[in-house]
Image (spheres, rainbow, N blue to C red):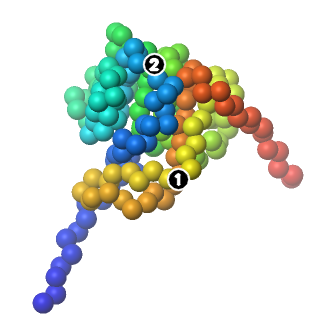
Amino acid sequence: MIKKKLPSKKVSPDDYMTPHYALNPLLKYLKKNWIIWECASGSGNLAKFLRKKGYKVVTTEILRGGTNNDFLTCKPPKKYNCILTNPPYSLKNEFLERCYKLKKPFALLLPLTTLETETRQNLFNNFGLEIIFFNKRINFEVPYQTKSNSSYFATAWFTNKLKIGNSLNFVKLERDN
């Protein structure tokens, strides 16, 4: 008897959920009395873990509640001290720009390719950047599947104003004509 394989639902690169262990390297930089805005909370993995660790967390998610919950356009919560999220990677420029504009400490889990492009490098040079690199890739949770065995891309916490202490220098590469 031949078994048919059920078609898998197409998963957008923006739909990968962050396992709680990805937060562990960041916790020592988050003050316990801070209110953390998880602004692209998705299924809530990060917010649940932060609450379990004793942090106060405010969440928004565009898929729950329309534009009033869209980080890029909504008013920030009345009280919050830090922004922390794994944003949709297709909107990483917009999330970075908004975070810098809000002038609060932030931590965004982003692919290492975020270091590329003149636009983002200008943001980093103008406003500062601290990065927490991992020695292993994160195994993101994939909707409609169990857990992925491994990630095909490396990620890091891109932070600002968390006093991580690391700095990066960017230079413009001039090509020979």
Q: Name the image quarter holding residue 68.
A: top left
In screen coordinates, is 65 left or right of 99? left
Q: Is residue 103 left or right of residue 39?
A: right
Amino acid on which disc 2 is placed: Lys
Is residue 15 visible from the viewing direction of this image? yes
Residue 106 visible? The answer is no
Q: Which residue is mark 2?
A: 31
Quadrant of the rendering where the N terminus is positioned: bottom left
- Residue 144 % position (x, y): 24, 57
Question: Which residue: 55% across, 34% down?
Answer: 158
Describe residue 139's horizontal placement relative to residue 160 as left or right.
Answer: left
Given residues 109 and 87, the one toward you in this image is 109
Which badge, 1 or 2, comes first in the chain's sequence?
2
- Residue at the location (33% across, 51% down)? 141
Q: Quadrant of residue 35?
A: top left
Q: Which residue is mark 1?
A: 136
Q: SS at mark 1?
A: loop
Residue furthest to the right in view is 176
Height in image: 37 above or below 86? above
Q: Residue at x 66, y 35 (%)?
A: 121
State the image coordinates of residue 25 (x, y, percent, origin top left): 49, 37
